[in-house]
Structures are given as structure tokens and as C-alpha cells.
Image: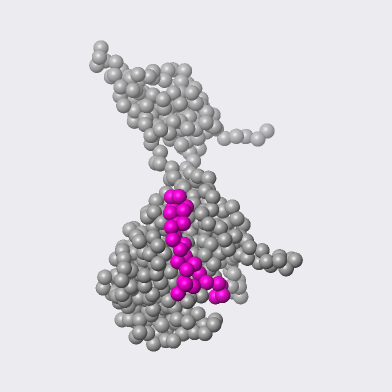
């Protein structure tokens, strides 16, 4: 008897499978696809700091987040802050005015115990060369000042337009140096100049190498916008080996639209192109508008296009993809001057969530790492209608996100285990088209097919401990399936 009972149950189970295969045919026309995988966003924390201009640039690494305040005006000096990413407590502050600089910052990064900020050339109050500073994360004390190497020939340059740091190496560039721009590598710990990128690369005039850039491990990526003899624009990315400075690849993208941001992961090269129109858009020949922006995801090794992401709210006032940040399989971006950031999966291109800021005056810097997002919303001081000066404080907020774990087939109560409780959930919701937690095959109704999904994955002792669906269930299952698939007629 010990052998006959399981075999008998298996026989009934086989009969059920035959019946369910027929039910499955009836349901084929009503099956629907799953929507975007949601994420859980915890309630935002209180701002870690609040004053005008804070959060215009944000970078995060390890236990720290680096933030720039008072950025964007040549008359307002930049200040960099380091905060503990877990508690929000201020760790240190780097104020270049203490060393005689009144410069705004336009780039920031952080790695281990070193932070770096960049300020490009300014001729507002006399010609000031671009400068990069490194400072100590724990104390805020300046470590080194980096200038363009002495062999550079141009006097009006753009050294320090952007900066990135990885593996103890700092990457920056001067898009206006020479005829096509140059990239530079420095040792982060000592401030020593290492090598130049692009000296031996054949390019035409006006390439503007390094308007935006990124370094990750052994790979450095710099954008370029070369013009040919006919004046046609050909945007792309030049890749260099960090150890040797030798060009290792080049990607020429489609369309006459610039690259504003670059992200690199172990698997992907990601480009933000905020003025790229949607392929379905029709743009008048005499119009400079109509762009929606696109984020293009390429395979890092083959440089083949994997995904293109467009945003449904993007229009010619938003420039989707102006800023991007990547970490693992996640991409974070925003619409320009919009108080939301959107989270996507790089491997699929799917939208998985968004952060809505409490302020309406726009999104600025943001970064993500592991399960944490930091996003800045810099305020703008202004004079009101009465002529009174109003301080509109900015802030930086932390958001925690938890990707929804992969769904376990047959796990109808969501605890990650297939057991008798899942059977109870299926049994209690059988026939429902509204309570679909036990809809194991995603056909829009809880039916006998979902029992099979559970039965095939539950341990045999558990399966033997619950009754097989009886004849009444078989009949109800068929009727429910036929009714669900029957087209509605109007009367």
C-alpha cells in the first residue's frame, strides 16, 4: 500500500495534466504579459543638509557620499561636503576659498579615502586655468592640485570640464586642447601625471575629445564630436586602456546628436544622448526642437547595441539622459529640470521604479550604489516681487530601494518557499480573476493549471499531505476557463 498510494495519485495527476492541456488551449488567446517589475521605495529621510545650491553634483562610494553646493555660477565658489551615507552626518568639508580660489565646481568623484573636484577654465574675471583638487575624505584637507601638463599649447582651454576616478586613477580631459582635444590620467594618491590619451589618435579638427568621460577599472571612455570636411557631425566614444594609454576601441553612434553622459559596468557601455529624437518623431527641417532624448546600452566587449531607452514623458523641454549613473544591472537617470529620477535595468531596458522629489525646482546630481540612491535638489536664491532676497534652500535626500526578488514558481504567498500554505492560497482563490496571487501561469485567472504549477514544484511529502482536486474542481475549472475565454457580446 505504501507504493500504490503515490502511484495512484500520480495517475490522477497525469489525468489532470491532460485536461489542463485542453484548458490551456482555451486560454491561449487571453494570456497577458507581465508589466514592469516594481521596486520598494522607503519613505525619504530628512535632508542631510539644506542651503542654496546644495546637491548640484553627487557621488557615492562605500560609506560616504560627496556633494557639491553653490555650483553653476562663476561668481559663486563651489564647496564640497562629505557625508556618512548611513547616518547623514557631515564628515568633512572642502572649501577652496581657504586657498584663494573662488571657483565653481563642475565635476566630483570619490573613492576610498580620496575625493576629487574639478573646475574648468574661466575667463570671467581674468584668464584662470582649469584646476582639479584632491582632498581627504575624513578631514577635508587638500591633498594635491592638478593642472594641465606643461606641454599643452593652447592658452584658452577647458581642462577640468569633467572628472572621474577609479582604481586609484583620475581621468579628466581638455576638449579644446590642440585640434581635437586630449585626455589625461593622474595618480590619485600622489597627484602625479601619468599619461596622455589621444595624442597618437588620428582625428580631424574639432573632435572635442572628452566633453564627457568615465573611467572604470582598466577602461577609460571619452566622448568625441568630430566634423568631417563637409561639416557633418559624427558623434562617438573613444576607448583607451588605462595602463598603456593606447586606444582600444571606438564606437560611432547613429544620428547627429551629442553624447552628454557615459556609464560603464562590467558588461555594458551606457550613453546618454539628451537631444536624440524618438524614431517615430517627425521634426521640421527648420526646427531645432523635437528631441526627446535616448539612453543607449551597448555590450562592453562587442560594442553592439543592446537596448535603447526612451521616456514617455520626454519632450523638447526635458532632455532625457543628460545625466546617468550606473551600478551593477541598474541605471539611474532623470529628465532635465524635473523632480524625478527613474530606475531601469540595463539587461532588459525595463523601467523598474522612480523617485519623486519633495521639491518642484528640479533634479540635479544623483548617484546609486547597492540599494541606496542619493539625489540632490539644489535651491535657487531669488528676489521676490517686493524686491526682498529669498533663500530657496536645496537639499540632498537618501532613498532606499529593494529590487523585488525573482518570483518562485508555485510560491503563492511570496515567502520564497513552495509549501502547503501556497496550496491553501490557491484553494481559497480558485476561480478568481481579481485575486491573482495564485495565478501561477499568468493567464488572468486562478485555475487548475496553477495547481499543476504548485504540484510540480512542491516536495513530494507535502504534495501527498493535501488532497487532489476533486471532480467538482475539475468541472469548475473547465467552466471558468471557457467563460474567461469567451468573447463578450454587446446587447
Does residue 224 lie above or below 480 as drawn? below
Does residue 416 lie above or below 323 as drawn? above
Does residue 27 lie above or below 354 as drawn? above
Is-magenta flag for residue 369?
no
The residue lying at 34 percent from left, 23 percent from top is 463
Q: Pinpoint residue 441: horizontal percent, then vertical percent.
A: 43, 35
Does residue 459 lie above or below 379 as drawn? above
- Most distant residue in the top direction: 1
Q: Pinpoint residue 218: horizontal percent, then vertical percent.
A: 29, 66
The quarter of the displayed image where residue 361 is located: bottom right
The residue lying at 31 percent from left, 64 percent from top is 167
| Count of numbered labels shown in the rendering | 0
Residues shaded magenta = 73-99
Is-magenta flag for residue 74?
yes
Of 121 and 446, the residue lying toward us = 121
Of 105 and 340, the residue lying toward us = 105
Quarter of the N terminus within the rendering = top left
Q: Pinpoint residue 295: horizontal percent, then vertical percent.
A: 46, 61
Amino acid at each position: 500500500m505504501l507504493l500504490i498510494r503515490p502511484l495512484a495519485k500520480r495517475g490522477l495527476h497525469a489525468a489532470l495534466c491532460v485536461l489542463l492541456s485542453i484548458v490551456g488551449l482555451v486560454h491561449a488567446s487571453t494570456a497577458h504579459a507581465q508589466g514592469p517589475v516594481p521596486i520598494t521605495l522607503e519613505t525619504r529621510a530628512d535632508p542631510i543638509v539644506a542651503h542654496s545650491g546644495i546637491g548640484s553634483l553627487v557621488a557615492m562610494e562605500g560609506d560616504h557620499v560627496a556633494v557639491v553646493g553653490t555650483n553653476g555660477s562663476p561668481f559663486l565658489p563651489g564647496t564640497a561636503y562629505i557625508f556618512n551615507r548611513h547616518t547623514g552626518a557631515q564628515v568633512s568639508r572642502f572649501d577652496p576659498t581657504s586657498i584663494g580660489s573662488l571657483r565653481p565646481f563642475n565635476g566630483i568623484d570619490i573613492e576610498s579615502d580620496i575625493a576629487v573636484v574639478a573646475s574648468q577654465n574661466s575667463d570671467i574675471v581674468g584668464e584662470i586655468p582649469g584646476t582639479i583638487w584632491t582632498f581627504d575624505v575624513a578631514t577635508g584637507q587638500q591633498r594635491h592640485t592638478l593642472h594641465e601638463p606643461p606641454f599643452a599649447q593652447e592658452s584658452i582651454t577647458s581642462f577640468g570640464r569633467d572628472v572621474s576616478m577609479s582604481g586609484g586613477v583620475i581621468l579628466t580631459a581638455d576638449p579644446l586642447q590642440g585640434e581635437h582635444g586630449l585626455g589625461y590620467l593622474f595618480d590619485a594618491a600622489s597627484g602625479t601625471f601619468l599619461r596622455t590619451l589621444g595624442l597618437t589618435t588620428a582625428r580631424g579638427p574639432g573632435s572635442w575629445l572628452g566633453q564627457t568621460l568615465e573611467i572604470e577599472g582598466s577602461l577609460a571612455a571619452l566622448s568625441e564630436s568630430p566634423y568631417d570636411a563637409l561639416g557633418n557631425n559624427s558623434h562617438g566614444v573613444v576607448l583607451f586602456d588605462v595602463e598603456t594609454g593606447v586606444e582600444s576601441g571606438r564606437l560611432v553612434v547613429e544620428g547627429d546628436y551629442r553624447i552628454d553622459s557615459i556609464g560603464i559596468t562590467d558588461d555594458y557601455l551606457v550613453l546618454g544622448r539628451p537631444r536624440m529624437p524618438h524614431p517615430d518623431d517627425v521634426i521640421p527641417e527648420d526646427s531645432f526642437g523635437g528631441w526627446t532624448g535616448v539612453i543607449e546600452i551597448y555590450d562592453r566587449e562587442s560594442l553592439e547595441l543592446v537596448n535603447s531607452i526612451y521616456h514617455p514623458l520626454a519632450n523638447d523641454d526635458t532632455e532625457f539622459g543628460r545625466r546617468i549613473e550606473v551600478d551593477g544591472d541598474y541605471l539611474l537617470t532623470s529628465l532635465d529640470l524635473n523632480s524625478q529620477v527613474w530606475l531601469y535595468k540595463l539587461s532588459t531596458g525595463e523601467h523598474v521604479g522612480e523617485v519623486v522629489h519633495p521639491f518642484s525646482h528640479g533634479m540635479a546630481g544623483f548617484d546609486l550604489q547597492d540599494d541606496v540612491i542619493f539625489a540632490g535638489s539644489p535651491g535657487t536664491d531669488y528676489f521676490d516681487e517686493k524686491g526682498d532676497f529669498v533663500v530657496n534652500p536645496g537639499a540632498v535626500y537618501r532613498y532606499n530601494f529593494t529590487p523585488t526578488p525573482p518570483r518562485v514558481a508555485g510560491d503563492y504567498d511570496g515567502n520564497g518557499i513552495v509549501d502547503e500554505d501556497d496550496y491553501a492560497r490557491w484553494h481559497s482563490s480558485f476561480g478568481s480573476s481579481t485575486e491573482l496571487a495564485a495565478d501561477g501561469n499568468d493567464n488572468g485567472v486562478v485555475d487548475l493549471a496553477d495547481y499543476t504549477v504548485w504540484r510540480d514544484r512542491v516536495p513530494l511529502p507535502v504534495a501527498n499531505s493535501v488532497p487532489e482536486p476533486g471532480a467538482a474542481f475539475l468541472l469548475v475549472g473547465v467552466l471558468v476557463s471557457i467563460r474567461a475565454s469567451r468573447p463578450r457580446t454587446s446587447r
